[in-house]
Image (cartoon, grey):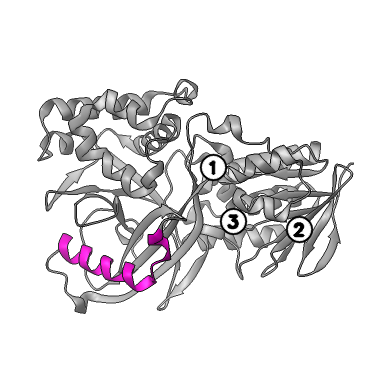
């Protein structure tokens, strides 16, 4: 089939938007189906007492090439701002500097040998390019062998415990390595870290993409989840949304993989089984609006027996917004009983944690608190993860399926989603 294919795109997060953007620019007719009332997925924004802000925080690194390329094509490159940011570590009831060799040397509560081993591991991880040798290696054992028991206990263990819980002893070293490397490569010198934000936040990119897609003939169906992708005789026929069947030449799905078996019951049994075995981490993300700053750090790692979080992000130390905004994400497997707790339980914890980290903060300093939940926030990537994923081009003619786990070992990110989505769009049209 040549030009002008009519293609359904499921999901309007960054990957779905990137797919539709590429298709529309190449002369095809994408129709984007999104369950939410707005585009963006995990990058979607909401009105937080007069501030338009993302439900979940995002930042950009100087290495985010696919993201920067799209900004350039949309004429939005001049809206990018780069800021020198700081990291901190809350440990032993002390706020310490973190994130560069001097901070590591001065860090209290860790022996010199442990510091050296931790620093060497981080440095070599940043320099490594080939992830394949780490693909089948289990992450906690890999880190312990490098940094030793002491640095593991102080600097790493809680990060695993409070993000992955009972999954923490079966994660891919390649996946964890890519996260170390991404932050390491956001430095423009060994001692200074530079992160970026878009003026107007992710909304600037989302609205830019949406307008470009519509200008090139694409369409959006918001509040229109797809209940079934219809498959007959080994090929895709179209989708059912809001009780109505619509025919399409091809379907490209970017919704979280756990939803796939439900909306594509016609897939071959072995493919359904592989999708059904994948696991995801959920998140309850609390956003606090404060009258005063919490710290001077953008990123604050926490290791505190009283706090069930591995860290928090003081977003306004990257992107100034008048008031002070802090994101506090609580990650946990979706089946964990904690995920069923009411929002108020998380809001109360955040109040207590922020007052502990900065004792000058009182209840009067909290302007507003809000919690957002996302059941499929992040895939759990165990060793050999990619080997078990079905190929994005499924053994059904005209059907492509992927989500953020398909660019493993990279962690989920706007830039990675854009790069992968555009390539998938090109492949789908050629295939």
Q: Secondary structure at mark 3?
A: loop
Q: Pick the residue in front: 46 or 328.
A: 328
> Which disc, if any, is residue 13?
3
- Start-end of magenta stretch: 337-357
Look at the image and tell me in which quarter the C terminus lies: top right
Q: Find residue 351 and report its image quarter.
A: bottom left
Residue 252 percent coordinates (x, y): 73, 48
Label 1, secondary structure: give it: helix
Q: Is residue 24 magenta?
A: no
Q: Is residue 126 visible?
A: yes
Compared with 236, 56 (above or below) is below
Disc 2 to disc 1, C-alpha distance: 27 Å
Nearer the camera: disc 2 or disc 1:
2
Q: Disc 3 and disc 2: Cα gap in Å?
A: 19 Å
Residue drawn at point x = 36 percent, y = 57 percent: 330
Q: In this rendered view, identify the residue nearer to me: 193 or 40.
A: 40
Q: Earlier in the sequence, mark 2 or mark 1?
A: 2
Name which residue lies at 38% across and 71% down. 343
The residue under label 2 is: 228
Specify the label residue 253 is tagged with. none
Label annotation for residue 416: 1
């Amino acid at each position: 089939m040549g030009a002008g294919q009519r293609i359904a795109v499921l999901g309007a997060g960054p990957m779905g938007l990137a797919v539709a953007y590429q298709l529309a620019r190449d002369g095809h007719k994408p129709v984007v189906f999104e369950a939410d009332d707005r585009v963006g997925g995990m990058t979607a924004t909401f009105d937080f007492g007069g501030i338009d802000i993302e439900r979940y925080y995002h930042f950009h690194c100087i290495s985010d090439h696919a993201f920067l390329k799209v900004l350039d094509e949309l004429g939005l490159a001049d809206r990018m701002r780069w800021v020198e940011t700081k990291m901190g570590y809350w440990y032993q009831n002390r706020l310490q500097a973190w994130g560069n060799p001097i901070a590591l040397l001065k860090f209290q509560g860790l022996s010199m040998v442990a510091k050296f081993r931790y620093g060497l591991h981080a440095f070599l991880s940043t320099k490594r390019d080939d992830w394949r040798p780490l693909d089948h290696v289990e992450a906690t054992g890999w880190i312990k062998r490098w940094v030793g028991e002491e640095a593991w206990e102080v600097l790493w263990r809680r990060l695993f415990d409070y993000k992955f819980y009972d999954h923490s002893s079966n994660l891919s070293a390649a996946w964890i390595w890519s996260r170390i490397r991404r932050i390491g490569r956001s430095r423009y010198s060994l001692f200074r870290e530079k992160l970026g934000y878009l003026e107007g936040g992710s909304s600037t990119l989302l609205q830019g993409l949406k307008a470009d897609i519509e200008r090139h003939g694409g369409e959006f169906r918001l509040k229109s989840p797809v209940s079934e992708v219809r498959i007959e005789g080994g090929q895709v026929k179209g989708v059912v949304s809001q009780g109505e069947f619509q025919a399409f030449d091809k379907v490209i799905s970017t919704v979280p993989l756990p939803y796939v078996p439900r909306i594509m019951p016609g897939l071959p049994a072995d493919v359904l089984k592989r999708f059904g075995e994948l696991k995801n981490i959920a998140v309850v993300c609390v956003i606090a609006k404060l009258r005063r700053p919490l710290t001077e750090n953008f990123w604050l790692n926490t290791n505190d027996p009283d706090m069930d979080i591995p860290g928090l992000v003081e977003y306004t130390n990257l992107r100034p917004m008048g008031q002070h905004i802090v994101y506090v994400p609580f990650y946990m497997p979706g089946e964990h009983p904690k995920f069923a707790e009411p929002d108020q339980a998380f809001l109360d914890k955040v109040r207590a944690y922020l007052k502990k980290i900065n004792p000058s903060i009182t209840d009067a300093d909290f302007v507003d608190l809000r919690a957002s939940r996302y059941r499929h926030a992040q895939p759990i990537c165990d060793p050999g993860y990619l080997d078990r994923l079905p190929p994005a081009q499924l053994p059904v003619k005209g059907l492509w399926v992927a989500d953020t786990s398909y660019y493993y070992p990279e962690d989920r990110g706007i830039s990675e989603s854009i790069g992968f989505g555009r390539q998938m769009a090109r492949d789908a049209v050629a295939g």
